[in-house]
Amino acid sequence: MLGPTGHTDTFTRDNLPPRDTWPEFRLSGFEYPDYLNVAAELTDAMVAKGFGDHTALIGNGRRRTYKELTDWTNRLAHVLAGDLGVRPGNRVLVRSANNPAMVACWLAATKVGAVVVNTMPMLRAGELREYVELAEIGHALCDTRLMEEMDACVAACPGLRVMGFDGSSNHDAELDRLALERPVRFDAVRTGRDDVALLGFTSGSTGTPKATMHFHRDLLIIADGYARDVLGVVPEDIFVGSPPLAFTFGLGGLAIFPLRFGATATLLEEATPPNMIEIIQKYRATISFTAPTAYHVMLRAMEEGADLSSLRAAVSAGETLPGPVYDEWIARTGKPMLDGIGATEMLHIFISNRFDDHRPACTGKPVAGYETRILDADGNDAPDGDVGRLAVRGPTGCRYLRGDRQEAYVKDGWNITGDSFTRDAEGYFHFAARNDDMIVSSGYNIAGPEVEAALLGHEAVSECAVIGAPDDTRGAIVEAHIVPARGFEASDALVGALQDHVKAMIAPYKYPRSIIFTESLPKTQTGKIQRFRLKRPDHERGKR
């Protein structure tokens, strides 16, 4: 049963999926008061605990203490409630790159009891319009440098009211000017712990956006669970990472986790591996969140003298972590790389390696509070070693806005994440592929990430992505798209050498029958390889 609400606009509570379609929530160890405002917990409450003079955020050439962040967000909250008329439960869209102003806008909107929809700069007007219409968004806060697509969205959504802010730290936009005239004290709305605080959009495999609904309590659970259990965050930690704050992975790793424990977040608008390396060295960052492809670049930078020794935790997610990258990281740093898996529906990471319990090509064991199973085709527990569908339940879980495709994700109280895994006899989980990315060739099930890991073990391979390519005889064949390492050039001889290497490393039937050499692989803003773009019908296939 849901607790009390502080929302006067009941849209999100009215549009929660039917209760009998929810996953089972296991909240033991995660108890919070009936009324809880997560933004107040991460700012005002931290000042009250004595962290006022600690640095909270670093970005765009400025440091901001917890006291400064608290005052800033309270001023903004006055503008949202007083000038914009935002009421508890209203949906507020925030459009920005990763910078302190985006964090401040998210916190301020949450303080006034709004339900926030964080969005990436790369979204275009048509995509923004889908979000606005699905979530019935009435207000938007937009970095003035990104206003063009926002204006185009407003033209199609005349009921949407937009106010600009300056994400570059100059504070020279309407929202900033108004905020400077407002008091630094604001009584945050007494939202219920079970009030929706955040809508996280995900397109999944269908391309159609779905909004996942997360309560105020959920945003603290991921900090009090994963960040405490796995990372052991302390106030001296300095976070850096590449995932957008618009993604729940980024919001957790670059805002919620550091702010929950009095630590510091460094924010990069362009979080390329070279920029991350520069920030790690400049501020002696201790915890990094990024994709394996970025860590691969960092390893090459260390060969050339980059000093990344300050990192005590290298968190890898978004892509499976290849064994060779894990092995080389340990060899160079003496510290493990923490592979893990999460989902927007689950809010953050729910299976992870630990500092004192980690293995190559392994995703680890469940995070505190979570249970996991591997299901066979009939929905029964699969034997250890067999590939099956991953099912998980715990203190967070899937709630789609309006129940959109809820029953496809939740079965018998378990969240079915869409990932294929195996579990070994010792209880460790090993990623195989996304359920829809398994390659079936001549009746064999082949997991692309396994082939990628084998290829990355060859010195000629800098990056690679493996997909299934249509084949009249076999149904599909394994096709590898490879970025050659420095000093190697594409040739038939290299194709043969790589194929022989894979045959020697794993079962020969898994070798790539097609190899395409390329200068780069298509990636998301977070560095995740976009394999679907390699599967386009018009893509030329063959050996190059």
Image (tube, rainbow, N blue to C red):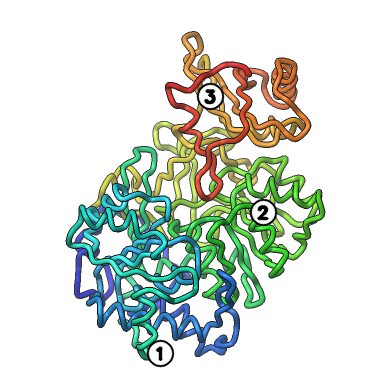
In the rendered structure, which amino acid carries the disc numbered 1? Val
Please name whichever residue, 390 or 256, is drawn nearer the observer in this view of the structure: 256
Which residue was labeled with disc 1? 184
Residue visible at 37% across and 91% down? Answer: 183
Residue visible at 75% across and 16% down? Answer: 493
> Where residue 445 is drawn, which disc sits there?
3
Mark 2 to mark 1 CA distance (whole Å): 37 Å
Query: Does the rendering let one see residue 34?
Result: no
Mark 2 to mark 3 CA distance (whole Å): 38 Å
In the rendered structure, which amino acid carries the disc numbered 2? Pro
Please say if 69 is above or below 310.
Answer: below
**Label 2's element?**
helix
Position of the N terminus, as image quadrant, is bottom left
Number of other residues with Cα within 10 Å of mark 3, as a class: few under 14, some 14 to 19, many 20 or more: few
Which residue was labeled with disc 2? 274
Indicate which disc, 3 or 1, sits on the residue closer to the N terminus.
Answer: 1
